[in-house]
Image (cartoon, grey):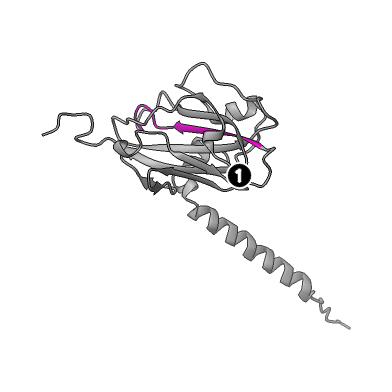
Amino acid sequence: MQTNIVKETNPIGSSLKFTKKIILLYYKMRRERDPLVIGRVIGDVIDSFTKSINLTVSYTDREVSNGCMLKPSQVLNQPRVDIGGDDLRAFHTLVMVDPDAPSPSDPNLKEYLHWLVTDIPATTGARFGQEVVCYESPRPSTGIHRMVFVLFRQMGRQTVYAPGWRQNFNTKDFAELYNLGSPVAVVYFNCQRESAFGGRRR
C-alpha cells in the first residue's frame, strides 16, 4: 500500500527568506544608484564604506553635491568644510584628491593630492584643523576630472602627517599607514577646463 507523504511547510521560515531577499535586493538597487558608485569614486579612490558623519563642502555659496559640475574659476579658493559629530575630542583628517590627473584617459599622476587637513575636531570645520598640505586649486587641462573629498576619523590627535609629494598619492594606502580605517564621509564634484580660463580677456 502506497502512502502519500505530505511535507509540512514552515510559513514563518518562508516569510523570513522572502524578507531577506527583498532586503538584499533593496541594498543592491541602492548601491547601484549611489553616485559614488556611478562616478567610480568607490573603486578608484576608496572601497565601500558606511557614512557615519555629515560632511559639507561649499565654495562661496555653492554647496558641493556628488557629481555636480564646478568650473576652475569657481574653486580658486579653498572651500568651507564643516563636519558633524558630537564629540570635540574626536579628530578627523580631510583629503582632497584628483584620481584623473593629468587626464582621465591617462591618469599616470593619480591620485593628485590637492589638499590635506588633519586634527579637525568633530562639530567644527577644516579651519580649526592643521593644514599640512596647502590647498591647490584644480586646473584640469584635458577631460572631466573628479575632485574627491574624503573624511577619516583619526585614532588620536597629531597622529597623521604630510606625505612628501602630491602626485601619485594613494588614499587607501594613506589610510592604512595611519590606521584611519574606512572613510566616515565622502563627497565629490566634477571639474573641466574652461575655454577662456587663464587666457586673454577680450
In this orientation, which residue lies closer to the viewer: 108 or 189?
189
24 over 71 or under it: above or below? below
Query: Taking 152 as reference, is 68 above or below it?
Result: below
Q: Is residue 179 left or right of residue 197?
A: right
Q: Is residue 44 above or below residue 123?
A: above
Q: Is residue 177 left or right of residue 73?
A: right
- Farthest residue in the top direction? 164
Give me the residue at 37% from left, 30% from top: 137
Element class at badge 1? loop
Residue 53 part of the magenta segment: no
Q: Which percent across, then down, holds residue 70?
A: 34, 43
Q: Position of residue 167 (x, y in %)?
A: 44, 21
Any part of residue 87 in sight: yes
State the residue at coordinates (67%, 40%): 88
Reading the image, the residue beneath label 1 is 123
Q: Which residues are magenta?
A: 91-104
Residue extending farthest to the left is 202
Q: Quadrant of residue 4?
A: bottom right
Instruction: Bin the neighbour count of mark 1 within 10 Å (Cα to Cα): few under 14, some 14-19, many 20 and up.
Output: some
Q: State the image coordinates of residue 184 (x, y, percent, origin top left).
A: 61, 42
Identify the residue at image location x=89%, y=83%.
1
Which kind of residue does numbered mark 1 sit on?
A: Thr
Q: Position of residue 130 (x, y in %)?
A: 56, 27
Q: In the rendered image, which quarter contains the C terminus? A: top left
In this view, 5 is above or below 65 = below
